[in-house]
Amino acid sequence: MTALEAAGRAIAAESARYAGMGWMRGTSGNLSVVLGRAPLRLAVTVSGRDKGELSMDDVVVVDERGEAVADQPHPERTPSAEAGLHGRIAAVSGAGAVVHVHALAPVVAAERWPGGVPLRDLEMLKGFGRAAHDDPVTVPVIANGQDMRALGDAFEAGYAADTPALIVARHGVYVWGDDLRQARHRLECLEWLLRFSVQWDTHTRSAR
């Protein structure tokens, strides 16, 4: 099995998992796996496919700008629209995989804390790669847009190496890791943390 085939199989399996969780509704969301770094090459989900029905062949190889490269089995296929942001995140963070889903909690949290979502003193932070106590975390939030270069610039301006996540307001969340498995674990923990924060903030406001 080639590296591209292995990446395609892993991406299809992870996409089906997220679709089952309701985090990739319709054809939304996209995943990527880094295939090489000199030059940067990523396998990313093709555009417009139901993420619960992907096969290992439903990926496109893109460069750091998110553009399909000629040297691949299907250069004519269209990569996900956000492939350029995947490329920027992988280039800046050194991540081996990037996951973008449309879970609701991150979007609601960004509405509540548009300058960045604060988290601290929660056990689940350990699953996100941070300490459970006395380790304040701020998950960055950037404005939505269709220009992936502009979104990449906004991401890079607020990037912190110890916070492997980015919320795009009124859109969704990006989480990354060394591979798809680590990215998934971080995403699952972050979604719980954000859901808790929104619900706790709502409770404390109503109790005033």
Image (cartoon, rainbow, N blue to C red):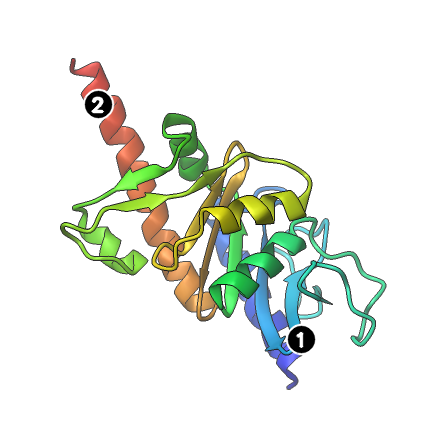
Which quadrant of the figure has residue 106?
Answer: top left
Along the viewing direction, whichever of 74 and 27 lies nearer the viewer: 74
Image point 27% across, 30% down: which residue? 199
Q: How many marks?
A: 2
Crowding near pointer 2: few (<14 within 10 Å), some, many (20+)?
few
Taking 201 as reference, is 173 left or right? right
Residue annotated with mark 2:
203
Residue annotated with mark 1:
39
First-in-chain label (1 vs 2): 1
Task: Give the answer, above or below, for where 82 lies relative to 38.
Answer: above
Q: Residue furthest right?
A: 76
Residue 171 % position (x, y): 55, 36
Q: Does the image show residue 48?
A: yes
Image point 29% across, 39% down: which residue? 118
Taking 156 as reference, is 75 left or right? right
Image point 25% across, 27% down: which residue? 201
Residue 97 % position (x, y): 51, 66
Q: Amino acid at mark 1?
A: Pro
